[in-house]
Every structure is written in C-alpha cells, then in structure tokens.
C-alpha cells in the first residue's frame, strides 16, 4: 500500500466490491490491497464488504459501504490526465459505460462517481495568450462531451488564421 498523508475515501451504498473491481480493471498500476468484512457484530450482514483499500494508477484510495445516506455529487470529481486521444477514448469509454456522459470531458460512472477525462494540452489551448485562440478553443470544448484535442486545436488555429494572427 502506498502510504500518503491524504487518501481519498469513497462512500458507496452497498456496491463497494463491484466498484473496486471495476476501477482496478480500468487503470494500470492498480490493485486491491485489502477488503475488510463485517462480522457478527455488524452493522452489516456478516461476510459482506465493509471497507477496502486499493490503488488506482499508483494512487491510494479507501472506500466503505456506508449506505445510501451520502451519494456522490459533482462537487467532488477525479481528473484523469491523458497523454493522447487514445487514452482519452479508453477512459471515456470504460468509465462512462453504464453511467452518464456530461459536457466538457465530465462523466458519471455507473456508481455515480464523477470523472474529468482531460487530454494533456487542453489547458494550454483554452488558456492561450492569444485571446482569439483561447476563446475559439473554449467555444469548441464547450460543444463537446468527450474532449477531442485535435478538433479544439483546429478551431483555435482557424480562429487565429481568420484574424490574421
């Protein structure tokens, strides 16, 4: 287990084991470290998963089956930085399956957890020092669900050519 002072802890209703198995299958350098189970003392049914420790792409996580009181919201999300469009497509396809696609690279997976699938270079384009390029890149991104960096870059380039920059 990777020891960190700060470790995200995810609260699931009752599907912690399915979620951990799914996430560790999607990301490289991932493993289930430990699943702890309820005993006769409860409060869950004996033998069912109470908590877990796992690693996703080298980052330590904890999780618990806490019940339906606190569902996930978009107020907390995990951002996945992708080296290229192939990675964007991989994570988008895997994580959105059974979930819900949103705008600008955001999605909710089938467990309700929010993710941002972000290609390297996106923030350079939407934060370009040329405001025409930056605005064109932003406008292109706002029209997308799954981010396509080549399309955003082309929009920025076209806008710059149109203004003679």
Image (cartoon, rainbow, N blue to C red):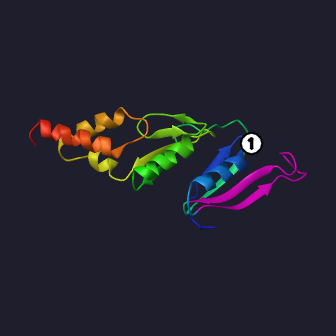
The one of 162 and 59 positioned closer to us in this rendering: 162
- The x and y percentages for residue 3 are 59, 67
Give the residue at the far front of this rendering: 86
Q: Quadrant of the C terminus?
A: top left
**Does any portion of residue 78 appear in the rendered image?**
no
Q: Is residue 10 above or below residue 97?
A: below
Considering the image in quadrants, where does the N terminus appear? bottom right
Q: Is residue 44 above or below residue 71?
A: below
Residue displayed at 61% across by 51% down:
23
Is residue 35 visible in the rendered image? The answer is yes
Residue 44 is inside the magenta segment: yes
| Left or right relative to 1: residue 137 | left
Find the residue positioned furthest to the left. Answer: 164
Which residues fall within the magenta stretch?
30-56
Return the residue at label 1. Answer: 14
Q: In the displayed structure, does residue 86 sit left or right of residue 150?
A: right
Give the structural element (helix, strand or loop) at label 1: loop
Tell me the crowding category of disc 1: few under 14, some 14 to 19, or many 20 or more residues within 10 angstroms, Cα based: some
Q: Nearer the viewer, residue 13 or 58?
A: 58
**Numbered label tally:** 1
At horizontal 24% and vertical 36% (from top left) the residue drawn is 136
Q: Is residue 62 left or right of residue 107?
A: right
- Taking the spot 31% from the left edge, 41% from the top edge, the residue there is 151
Residue 57 screen position, x and y as percent: 54, 60
Task: Give how far across and how far down residue 41 sits, in percent.
Answer: 89, 51
Asked whether residue 64 is drawn in magenta, I would say: no
Outermost residue to the top: 143
Q: Position of residue 24 (x, y in %)?
A: 62, 56
């Amino acid at each position: 287990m990777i020891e960190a002072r700060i470790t995200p802890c995810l609260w699931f209703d009752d599907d912690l084991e399915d979620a951990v198995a799914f996430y560790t299958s999607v990301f490289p350098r991932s493993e289930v470290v430990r699943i702890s189970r309820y005993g006769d003392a409860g409060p869950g049914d004996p033998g069912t998963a109470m908590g877990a420790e796992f690693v996703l792409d080298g980052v330590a996580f904890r999780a618990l089956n806490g019940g339906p009181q606190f569902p996930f919201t978009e107020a907390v999300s995990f951002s996945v930085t992708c080296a290229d469009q192939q990675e964007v497509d991989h994570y988008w396809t895997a994580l959105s399956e059974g979930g819900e696609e949103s705008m600008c690279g955001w999605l909710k997976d089938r467990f309700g957890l929010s993710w941002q699938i972000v290609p390297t270079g996106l923030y350079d384009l939407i934060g370009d020092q040329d405001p025409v390029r930056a605005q064109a890149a932003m406008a292109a991104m706002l029209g997308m669900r799954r981010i396509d960096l080549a399309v955003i870059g082309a929009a920025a380039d076209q806008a710059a050519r149109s203004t003679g920059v």
